[in-house]
Image (cartoon, helix red, strand yellow):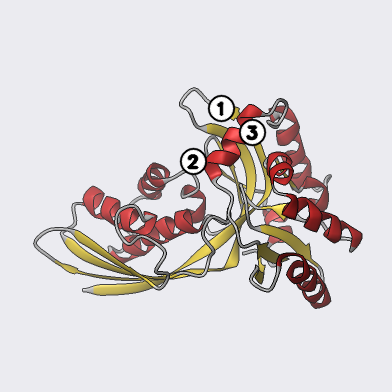
Amino acid sequence: MGQIEVFSPAKINLFLSVLGRMENGFHELVSLVSPVDFGDRISIEVEEALQPSVSLVCDDEGLPTDASNLAFAAAELFLTRRGLSWRAQLRLEKRIPCGAGLGGGSSNAAAVLLGLNRLVSGSAEDKDLLEMAAELGSDCPLFLRGRSVVMRGRGELLEDIAPSALQRLSGKCVLLFKPSFSVATPWAFAALAATSGAYGERTLAEERLRAWQSGDLSLADLLDNTFESVIFAKYPAFSALSDRFAQAGFRLLLSGSGSCCYSLLDTKEDEGRLTSIVREAWGKGAFVRACQIL
């Protein structure tokens, strides 16, 4: 009946301030988030059926292919909300490393929502997609925009950034790199909650974002991540590599709750130099990928 292939980008948190725990149990945050041109691909094929059903095939055998996979759950939710008796077959080509803080699962879910929406000629309103994405996970809504945004709340409140600021980000080169281990997001949030003074301060976070958007603060001076204090303290591999980067004149930053890190690049030579430093510190098995901000 129809098929489509959609790109599912990774994201980096250029600025992430976790403000504290809300009454609903989620943590409140404010973050500048950017999708990049590296990510997964999802093929979606649908056909009429007597009742809705979803199947998922993935080239990463370590990932679940049932409703515990956000791409699968997104397809089920979309078909249910739209009252569609479709058989949806998903094929996921996984490139984003899992447990990296790059939003891979959330991006997959958003990509499936967007792909299915296109197959029904865009009949769903943006608000409907946003509500479904927020139901699936905190990071899912940001991937519906396809560009850098500021997100607040638990991640479901999105705000477009100033066009001039967006232009400054678009096309900027980034090196992604991840050690062989992952950092569990629940542990990272629990560690913040248990550490006195670890949470960010709302007024300061908002002031820094406003200053950057207006051009009064450089991107280099904006870069920050609340999680670094607790994660660097627990995992010496990050602080050791951060020191190596600093000696070379670069900054190492975490994306999300880790364990993937990133550094901004100015030249192709920077990419090769930093890749060598990462390989020397974390071994040849470390994930390294150069990409650009969309």
Marks 1/2 in contact by CB < 8 Å: the verdict is: no
The residue depicted at 71 percent of the width and 25 percent of the height is: 196
Q: Circle 2: is it few (<14), some (14-19), or many (20+) Cα within 10 Å?
A: some
18 with respect to 53 (left or right): right
Q: Circle 1: is it few (<14), some (14-19), or many (20+) Cα within 10 Å?
A: some
Q: Which residue is mark 2?
A: 156
- N-term mark: 2 or 3: 2
Q: Circle 3: is it few (<14), some (14-19), or many (20+) Cα within 10 Å?
A: many
Amino acid identity at mark 1:
Arg
115 with respect to 198 (left or right): left
Secondary element type, mark 3: helix
- The quarter of the picture where the C terminus appears is bottom right
The residue depicted at 85 percent of the width and 55 percent of the height is: 243
Amino acid identity at mark 3:
Leu
Q: CA distance from mark 2 to mark 3?
A: 21 Å
In front: 253, or 165? 253
- The quarter of the picture where the N terminus appears is bottom left
In front: 86, or 147? 86
Q: Quadrant of residue 48?
A: bottom left
Residue 133 image point, x, y percent: 40, 48
Secondary element type, mark 2: loop
74 with respect to 174 (left or right): left
Q: Which residue is mark 1?
A: 21
Q: CA distance from mark 1 to mark 2?
A: 15 Å
Amino acid identity at mark 2:
Glu
In front: 127, or 171? 171
Q: Which residue is mark 3?
A: 192
How many tags in the picture? 3
